[in-house]
Amino acid sequence: MRYWLNDMGEVGAGKTIEVELDRAANIRLLDFENFKLFKQGLPHEFVGGFIRFTPYRIVTPKQAHWVIVADLGGTEGEVSASYKIYPTDRIPKMRATRFE
């Protein structure tokens, strides 16, 4: 499976990750241990899911080494994504775009 990923390194608990997508896709926020399981095709835990709008926001549940992954769930094509990290008290207003 092809996917976009970014290793964010150590991120504290309660930070907001804002992800911009170019199309509907699966988003997974994984701590590093779960990312290793994901790469091996093994069961893993993550925050996220199938996202049909952009931007999408996720709050980090704990301090950890985080990796964010976007994929199309096995369908043909590629996904492009970017992200920003915001402190919880400085989150800008959001204008969402919904994908068809």
Image: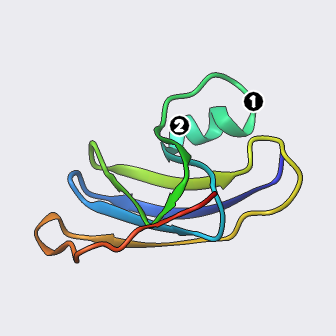
Q: Secondary structure at mark 1?
A: loop
Quarter location, residue 34: top right
Q: Where's the N terminus, which quadrant?
A: top right
Residue 81, image x, y percentages: 61, 69
Residue 40, image x, y percentages: 75, 33
Does label 2 or label 1 sit earlier along the sequence? Answer: 2
Question: In the depicted view, which residue is nearer to us: 71 or 75?
Answer: 75
- Judged left or right of residue 76, residue 100 is left
Q: Residue at x 35, y 74 (%)?
A: 95
Q: Where's the C terminus, which quadrant?
A: bottom right
Residue sitting at the far top: 43
| Whether residue 26 is situated above or below residue 40 in the rendered picture | below
Q: Are marks 2 and 1 in contact (CB under 8 Å)?
A: no
Hey, what amino acid is under mark 2? Glu
- Judged left or right of residue 14, residue 30 is right
Hey, what amino acid is under mark 1? Gly
Q: Residue at x 68, y 70 (%)?
A: 80
Q: Nearer the viewer, mark 2 or mark 1?
A: 1
Q: Residue at x 89, y 52 (%)?
A: 76
Residue at the spot of label 1:
41
Q: Residue at x 69, y 24 (%)?
A: 42
Question: In the depicted view, which residue is nearer to us: 86 or 52?
Answer: 52
Residue at the spot of label 2:
33
Question: Could you give the CA–CA distance between mark 2 and mark 1, rounded to whole angstroms?
Answer: 13 Å
Q: Residues within 10 Å of mark 1 (few under 14, many from 20)?
A: few
- Judged left or right of residue 44, residue 91 is left
Q: Residues within 10 Å of mark 2 (few under 14, many from 20)?
A: some
| Whether residue 97 is situated above or below residue 30 in the rendered picture | below
Residue 57, image x, y percentages: 36, 58
